[in-house]
């Protein structure tokens, strides 16, 4: 077969070609240049990150005609034979198919012979963790004290399965996953040299699907190249690779944050029609919430798997949500993804999770609740309208507060009447609408008026009778009456006189008056706005009401 796949055609030939393993390549280059190369190495790490390629390059560096050198020429006979896998002095052994002790004994027998043409005889044992325990035991002595012309390189994806007796006799180098950005850059370079027209968005998708493996990324690109030729459209690539389109993914996230379960289910149906597995949908959704939480708490630098455009898009969608809400969504999605993988009906399980997420109540930080309680308590004491309402979402409160802070400060009129607000005027004959209008201007004043024992209007006189002495004292203040007089003038279009009466003594003199007064006080305390809001938030109840102790 004449065709050579991209993973083999573009296999690294020098240490500089190894992608994102700078620490390993730097150490090996220094060892070769200083002549301090160990007799045995273990290269461990994920699949497709360059372990075997690095072993071959190290063999070239030691056996190159101009070597040992950290920069093999790749032109001499030795370098070419090693690159093509034809060298008699570089023996590659697949431990997965040569696991027995007899295979190791054959290695031990051949170790004593000098190299055929090069300077060193190098054994590269791939997937070394597959060797049996007896094979490892047979290799121990030779691995510890090999002849000076022999070098062992063990490559493995599961270093924890290798006995510690072997590990202690080798220098170990840990290879890491290749970052998405590095894979994308390498793919862009290779596709440019191969004259393949592919969008940058597609390169990012392939890099993300590779999961840190450069070899997997090239294999996926080979698949697309075989299917579509030298021009690869992004939509076609998404369909062939079975990847969830990020537009659908963002639509599902937006539906969850907007509390719209219908949009979420419709998005899932569209994804299913395109052949997306529900388990894959759940994984990508979980990953998106992870990105959103990291972006919210740690910044863009911590998310290396996404492009800057994707980061900005996710940050924009979730900008109005608190960290606590994103934590709750991530935890629920994590539990849901695990249950979906175990379920015999993943589609229905995912539908349930989406509905649950899209109907989840938003979490308000405890610090915010305390601040709003303090703000409401202070407003009640001063008689001002509270700037923080405990029943409104945190985002709405922040927007309302920012808008209020941006408004220019206006000097109130001498009469103490606030500037009119665009609210419909009530009917003068409807006392209920008058109280509602006053409450819309000053919530505290309106609430206290609603607790009055009796309110009547005769001609130009507005009479109020309170059974609470505190309310009576408050409304007898000149500034309070001036403010109320301004509201009444707006309602009745004329100046109104105000009469305030206190009926607490009359109730006390009635039979059982003291008991009735205590009951009324308890009722009024339970109707206190701050207390109601606190009960609604914390889910408590009033157990008893005790009078304040005199000092």
Image (cartoon, rainbow, N blue to C red):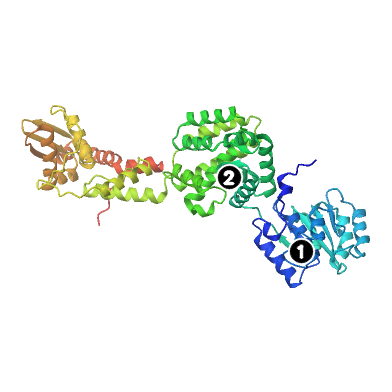
- Neighbours of disc 2 within 10 Å: few (<14), some (14-19), many (20+): many
Q: Which of 253 and 273 is in front in this view?
A: 273
86 displayed left or right of 449: right
202 displayed left or right of 516: right
Question: Which residue is found at the position 68% from the left and 38% from the top?
Answer: 223
User: Measured from the top left, where is residue 466 in percent x and y?
Assistant: 16, 39
User: Measured from the top left, where is residue 268 in percent x and y?
Assistant: 55, 30
Quote the CA–CA distance across marks 2 and 1: 34 Å
**Quarter holding residue 397:** top left
User: Measured from the top left, where is residue 120 in percent x and y?
Assistant: 84, 65
Against 177, residue 442 (above or below) is: above
- Quarter containing the C terminus: bottom left
Q: Which of 102 and 431 is in front in this view?
A: 102
* N-term-proximal mark, 2 vs 1: 1
Element on which disc 1 rests: helix
- Quarter containing the N terminus: top right
Q: Nearer the viewer, residue 334 or 545?
A: 334
Question: Which residue is found at the position 73% from the left and 69% from the top?
Answer: 31
Q: Which of 254 and 384 is in front in this view?
A: 254
Residue to which mark 1 is pinned: 61
Mark number displayed over residue 204: 2
User: Depth-wise, is mark 2 or mark 1 nearer the camera?
Assistant: 1
């Amino acid at each position: 077969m004449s065709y050579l796949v991209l993973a083999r055609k573009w296999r690294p030939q020098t240490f500089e070609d190894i992608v994102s393993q700078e620490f390993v390549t730097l150490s090996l280059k220094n060892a070769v240049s200083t002549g301090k190369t160990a007799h045995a190495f273990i290269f461990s790490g994920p699949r497709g990150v360059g372990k075997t390629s690095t072993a071959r390059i190290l063999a070239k560096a030691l056996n190159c005609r101009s070597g040992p050198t950290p920069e093999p020429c790749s032109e001499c006979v030795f370098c070419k034979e090693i690159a093509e896998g034809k060298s008699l002095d570089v023996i590659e052994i697949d431990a997965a198919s040569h696991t027995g002790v007899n295979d190791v004994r054959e290695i031990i027998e051949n170790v004593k012979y000098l190299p055929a043409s090069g300077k060193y005889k190098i054994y590269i044992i791939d997937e070394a963790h597959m060797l049996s325990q007896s094979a490892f035991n047979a290799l121990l002595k030779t691995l510890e004290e090999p002849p000076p012309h022999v070098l062992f390189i063990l490559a493995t994806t599961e270093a924890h399965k290798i006995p510690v007796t072997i590990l202690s006799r080798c220098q170990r180098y840990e290879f890491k996953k290749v970052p998405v950005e590095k894979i994308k850059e390498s793919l862009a370079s290779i596709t440019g040299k191969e004259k393949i027209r592919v969008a940058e968005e597609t390169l990012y998708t392939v890099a993300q699907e590779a999961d840190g493996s450069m070899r997997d990324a090239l294999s996926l690109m080979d698949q697309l190249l075989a299917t579509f030729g030298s021009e690869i459209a992004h939509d076609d690539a998404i369909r062939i690779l079975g990847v969830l389109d990020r537009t659908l993914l963002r639509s599902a996230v937006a539906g969850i944050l907007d509390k719209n379960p219908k949009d979420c289910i419709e998005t899932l149906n569209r994804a299913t029609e395109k052949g997306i597995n529900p388990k894959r949908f759940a994984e990508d959704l979980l990953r998106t919430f992870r990105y959103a939480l990291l972006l919210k708490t740690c910044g863009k630098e911590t998310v290396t798997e996404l492009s800057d455009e994707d980061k900005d898009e996710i940050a924009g969608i979730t900008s109005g949500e608190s960290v606590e809400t994103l934590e709750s969504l991530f935890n629920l999605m994590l539990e849901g993804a695990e249950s979906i993988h175990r379920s015999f009906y993943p589609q229905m399980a995912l539908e349930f999770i989406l509905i649950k997420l899209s109907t989840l109540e938003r979490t308000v930080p405890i610090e915010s609740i305390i601040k709003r309680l303090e703000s409401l308590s202070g407003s009640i004491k001063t008689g001002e309208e509270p700037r923080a309402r405990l029943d409104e979402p945190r985002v709405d409160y922040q927007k309302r507060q920012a808008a209020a802070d941006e408004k220019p400060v206006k000097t109130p009129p001498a009469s103490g009447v606030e500037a009119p607000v665009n609210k419909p005027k009530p009917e003068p004959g409807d006392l209920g609408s008058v109280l509602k209008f006053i409450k819309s201007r000053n919530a505290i004043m309106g609430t206290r008026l609603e607790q009055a024992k009796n309110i009547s209007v005769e001609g130009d006189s507005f009479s109020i009778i309170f059974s609470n002495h505190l309310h009576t004292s408050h409304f007898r203040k000149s500034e309070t009456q001036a403010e109320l007089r301004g509201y009444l003038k707006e309602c009745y279009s004329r100046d109104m006189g105000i009469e305030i009466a206190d009926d607490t003594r009359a109730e006390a003199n009635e039979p059982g008056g003291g008991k009735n007064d205590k009951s009324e006080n308890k009722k009024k305390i339970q109707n206190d706005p701050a207390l109601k809001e606190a009960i609604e938030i914390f889910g408590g109840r009033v157990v008893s009401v005790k009078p304040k102790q005199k000092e």
